[in-house]
Image (spheres, helix red, strand yellow):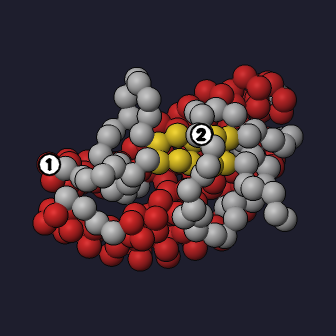
Amino acid sequence: MNDPYPVALEVERPRSFQRAHVFLRVALLVVIGWIGHPLGLLWLGLPVVAAILVSQKGAQRYLDESGPVLARVLGWILAVVAYLALLTDRLPDRGEQPARIRLERSGSPTVGSTLLRIVYAIPSLFVLALLTLVGAIVWLVAILLVLVDERYPESMWRFLLGLVRWEACVLAYLASLVDRYPPFALNTESVTAAASSTG
């Protein structure tokens, strides 16, 4: 299947990173650690919310009416993740987002198929979790480099970008906004077209 996956995340790499943001990231990660990892909550919560909306609206109305709203919410979540992953030095705000998601909604979700994605996503989430362990080491090295020189190598940035892009694909799949299973690949290449917040 050579068709591009219907979810793309674009993040613009800053020329340098501010040291002060390292400490803000660590503080945010501590707070998030107290609350619980958001991916775990999203893994269960997104399919449940999608199933409720599909049961109320039907598949097409869910994609047409709720899809853009969920895409914006996912875009905001992924912008926060991109900040925490040291891809950008900007948190999301009301203006232009530092991370932009392009999402082409597809499929015909049912309540059952939406809830089954909790189980279907396990292999992808398992591999992503393993890669995230490697990503944590890369992130720590990048943090140290930013503290010393306010930069870190682009190859490390691209690896972390690939992890966040994989997470974007999984989250869109869990929300039943796309029908195709997330690819088992780190997409570290630049997306040529500017991504928009909804598709």
Q: Earlier in the sequence, mark 1 or mark 2?
A: 1
Q: At 82% from the left edge and 63% from the top edge, which residue is drawn?
A: 2
Q: At 69% from the left edge and 34% from the top edge, which residue is drawn?
A: 199
Above-or-below relation of 194 to 152: above
* Corner quadrant of residue 94: top left
Q: Judge whether residue 171 can be spotted in this image.
A: no
Residue sitting nearer the eye, 195 or 85: 195
Residue indicated by mark 2: 195
Horizontal side of 27 relative to 107 (left or right) equals left
Residue sitting nearer the eye, 135 or 171: 135
Q: Nearer the viewer, mark 1 or mark 2?
A: 2
Percent across and percent down for residue 21 are: 20, 48
Residue sitting nearer the eye, 117 or 146: 146
Horizontal side of 88 relative to 109 (left or right) equals left
Percent across and percent down for residue 192 are: 61, 49
Q: Amino acid at mark 1?
A: Ala
CB within 8 Å, label 1 to label 2? no
Could you say which disc has been placed on residue 38 in the image?
none
Q: Judge whether residue 130 can be spotted in this image.
A: yes
Percent across and percent down for residue 53 are: 71, 30
Could you say which disc has been placed on residue 20 in the image?
1
Residue sitting nearer the eye, 95 or 154: 154
